[in-house]
Image: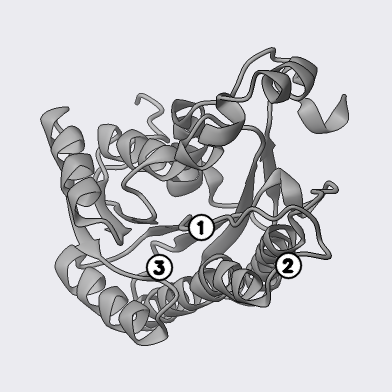
Amino acid sequence: MAYKPFDLSGKGVLVTGGNGGIGLGFAEACAASGAHVVIWGTNETKNADAVAKITGDGGTAFAMKVDVSDEAAVVAAMAETAARLGAIHSVFANAGIGRLSRSFMEMKTEDYRAVLAVNQDGVFWTLREAAKHMVERYNAGDRSGGSLVGVASLAAIEGAARNQHYAASKGAVVSMIKASAVELARYGIRANAILPGWIATDMTAGGQANEKFVQNVIGRVPARRWGTPADFGGIAVYLTSDASSYHSGDSFLIDGAYAIY
């Protein structure tokens, strides 16, 4: 019999912030491997474009307008997602924002609160509601398990000057994932974090356009290039698949070896 650990047929996958960047990379790869993908995003035009791209490539997907910084919206959307999919097997809590500041001393409290509302609170509510659904399935006799993935950042483990709010939110995701991995393992649920390095997305558009930044920072990446959303497809499929059924509590640093150079 052929070994097909990465066949995601029958899997329901939710990706928050899945209408672009790394999130779309997750969604496209899972759909291409047979999963039924749901995208949450706040921009309906981008949501529709992402679904069109996935379905145009032969995948199955739908999108919902959801603001993860709104607890009530997350609770309602998770219930609707579960009802439409039947079962949610994998959740990528990927939605995130950044706010630029000239220095820590000039960082505005409203920017700090806005970043944590999406990057920390949004991840907390998303993972909590997903865990409820997965535990309920387990208690009802469905032992197919589940995968919770929190998207953190290189900033969670490395000094990120002028980004204390962003770094704090991403460090929280790593800790949240570890706690979830320990508590939820008895229900067949695994939890892992993904820490992207310098990736070419809309969020890093300013850096991409800055020649000095590209020279000084990307020039230090041993892989000698920006990462791309497509670089996250393999890890998305692995963490959704049964191949990762005993892999939990880990942090996957995907940065072209930047952090260790």
What residue is drawn where x is 65% and y is 18%?
Answer: 211
Residue hosting label 3: 143
Lateral position of residue 6 relative to residue 174, left or right = left
User: In what quadrant of the picture does the C terminus appear?
Assistant: top right
In three-dimensional space, the C-alpha distance between marks 3 and 1, rounded to whole angstroms, equals: 31 Å
Q: From the viewer's perspective, is the residue at label 1 or at label 2 nearer?
A: 1
In three-dimensional space, the C-alpha distance between marks 3 and 2, rounded to whole angstroms, equals: 26 Å
Lateral position of residue 165 relative to residue 30, left or right = right
Lateral position of residue 211 relative to residue 78, left or right = right
User: In what quadrant of the picture does the N terminus appear?
Assistant: top left
**Which one is in front, 215 or 26?**
215
Q: Choose the circle earlier in sequence order: 3 or 1.
A: 1
Percent x, y of residue 208? 57, 26
Q: Is residue 85 above or below residue 4?
A: below
Percent x, y of residue 190? 57, 61
Name the amino acid, label 3. Arg
Discs 1, 2 touching: Cβ within 8 Å: no
Name the amino acid, label 2. Ser
